[in-house]
């Protein structure tokens, strides 16, 4: 059988194996067993338990910290106040005039839009000198709108034909619908109060707004022609 | 069909493995070595104790026959288990645990040889150090002689053949695993094992006077 097995895949011999088993009966020394098992016990101290020991309080601290940070952040956010620009009807919002056709459409819609714009001007509170950041942001936004208006005007000057330039009242009405009113209706009722409003705007540094209001003043109250 | 032939081929080997574990206490549930090692990696010391008790004696005999000096075998044995303990974090059950264990042991033995250049033929293993009880004197003498002959034949084997034979007998490893551990081709391992077994069988068959 052993010879037969020698030709097989595994050339072991059961007789030799049995004899070797009978001979080899040594066992590992007890003192080595103690040493190795003690070393295994010492090395097997689960590290994840140590990690969990500080992980849970750390998680709590992190959670509380994040919550506090969110609360502080929310409390430091500026009060949104009355939604001035959000309350503007869509018709009075400055549209992006990108083509003469669009300008014509706006021109047609101008009479209807003039009234809401005036109402918006009424709602707008009078501006005074203030160091409030909210007021500053409003001024910056107003200036941005003025710049946008100037860009639109420049576009219209470039693209509008001469015929469109002749229709001055309609263009003015478009401008009125597009621009912000910096002086309310009470101020604009009288040329003197309007002028005072314009001077106030200049004192506040809103030169562009003052210039626009000055133009409106000139349109509303044209200077008398000299003979 | 092929499977049954394979089973028949492996039957003597399975017998030898069962004989190897004959001294071990019979257990109802025998968890896999790899599972035990993974449990030990997760901090279960009891799993390591089971694993250690399962393999310690075979590994010690492997190193004892390989080193041929008890003190050296004990040093290497301790070193092997130390490495197993250290490597528990990186242990991946990609192969049999015994392959992993005996690979570490083989490498530790190679390191030991390199450290101790004068590792030679001075064996201090006494085959009759643990005499059997209960046998009649004639049987004891005969067993003792058989032991001496086999032990002498085993010691006379070249290191590579002895290594392969011990991996086969003590580790219960197959040729592929032996080839992996000894870093040789499967056919080389097979050839070494065949030569080793032939020499041992011849030594056993020799009359006592010539042994």
Image (cartoon, rainbow, N blue to C red):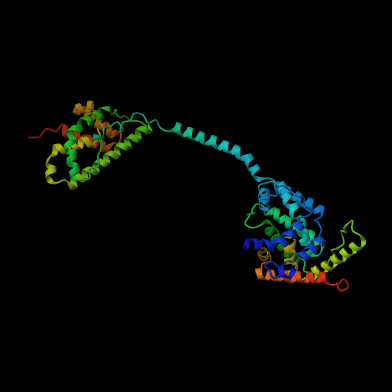
Q: Is residue A166 left or right of residue A98?
A: left
What residue is drawn where x is 71% and y is 56%?
B83
Question: Does residue B77 show up?
Answer: no
If the image is split into quadrants, where does the C terminus of chain B sit? Answer: bottom right
Residue B174 point in image, percent of width and height: 68, 63
Q: Quadrant of residue B81?
A: bottom right
Q: Which residue, as the protein is rendered here, is positioned at the far top?
A: A186
Question: Does residue A58 show up?
Answer: yes
Q: Quadrant of residue A61?
A: top right
Q: Quadrant of residue A87?
A: top left
Q: Which residue, as the protein is rendered here, is positioned at the far right?
A: B137
Q: Which residue, as the protein is rendered here, is positioned at the far bottom?
A: B210
Q: Is residue A212 above or below residue A160?
A: above
For this rendering, which residue is in front, B57 or B10? Answer: B10
Residue B202 point in image, percent of width and height: 80, 72
How many marks are shown on the rendered structure? 0
Residue A222 point in image, percent of width and height: 14, 33
What residue is drawn where x is 27% and y is 34%?
A202
Q: Is residue B112 above or below residue B81?
A: below
Q: Is residue A163 left or right of residue B143?
A: left
For this rendering, which residue is in front, B148 or B18? Answer: B18
What residue is drawn where x is 88% and y is 65%?
B142
Q: Is residue B113 left or right of residue A99?
A: right
If the image is split into quadrants, where does the N terminus of chain B sit? Answer: bottom right
Residue A107 point in image, percent of width and height: 17, 38
For this rendering, which residue is in front, A207 or A226? Answer: A207
């Amino acid at each position: 059988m052993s010879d037969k097995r020698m030709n097989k895949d595994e050339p072991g011999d059961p007789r030799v194996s049995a004899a070797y088993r009978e001979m080899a009966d040594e066992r590992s020394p007890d003192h080595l067993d103690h040493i190795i098992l003690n070393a295994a016990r010492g090395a097997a101290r689960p590290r994840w338990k140590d990690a969990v020991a500080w992980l849970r309080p750390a998680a709590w601290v992190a959670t509380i910290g994040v919550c506090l940070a969110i609360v502080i952040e929310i409390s430091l956010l500026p009060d949104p106040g009355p939604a001035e620009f959000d309350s503007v009807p869509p018709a009075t919002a400055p549209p992006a005039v990108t083509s003469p056709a669009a300008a014509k459409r706006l021109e047609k819609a101008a009479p209807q839009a003039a009234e809401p714009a005036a109402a918006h001007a009424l709602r707008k509170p009078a501006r005074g000198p203030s160091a409030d950041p909210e007021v500053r942001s409003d001024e910056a936004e107003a200036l941005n709108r003025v710049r946008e208006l100037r860009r639109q005007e420049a576009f219209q000057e470039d693209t509008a034909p001469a015929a469109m330039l002749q229709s001055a009242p309609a263009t003015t009405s478009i401008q009125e619908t597009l621009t912000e009113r910096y002086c309310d209706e009470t101020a604009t009722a009288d040329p003197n109060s309007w002028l005072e409003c314009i001077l106030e705007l200049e004192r506040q540094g809103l030169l562009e707004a003052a210039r626009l209001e000055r133009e409106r003043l000139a349109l509303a109250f044209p200077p008398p022609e000299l003979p | 069909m092929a499977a049954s032939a394979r089973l028949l081929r492996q039957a003597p080997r399975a017998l030898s493995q069962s004989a190897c574990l004959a001294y071990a206490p019979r257990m109802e549930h025998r968890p896999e070595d790899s599972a035990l090692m993974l449990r030990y990696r997760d901090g279960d010391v009891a799993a390591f104790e089971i694993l250690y008790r399962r393999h310690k004696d075979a590994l010690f005999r492997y190193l004892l026959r390989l080193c041929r000096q008890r003190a050296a075998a004990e040093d290497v044995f301790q070193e092997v288990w130390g490495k197993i303990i250290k490597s528990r974090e990186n242990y991946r059950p990609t192969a049999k645990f015994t392959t992993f264990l005996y690979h570490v042991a083989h490498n530790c033995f190679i390191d030991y040889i390199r450290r101790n250049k004068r590792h030679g033929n001075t064996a201090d293993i006494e085959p009759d150090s643990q005499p059997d009880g209960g046998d009649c004197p004639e049987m004891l003498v005969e067993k003792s002689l058989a032991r001496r002959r086999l032990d002498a034949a085993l010691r006379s084997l070249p290191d590579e053949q002895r290594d392969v034979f011990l991996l086969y007998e003590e580790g219960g490893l197959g040729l592929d695993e032996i080839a992996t551990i000894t870093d040789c081709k499967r056919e080389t391992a097979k050839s070494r094992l065949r030569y080793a077994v032939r020499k041992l069988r011849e030594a056993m068959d020799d009359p006592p006077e010539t042994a």
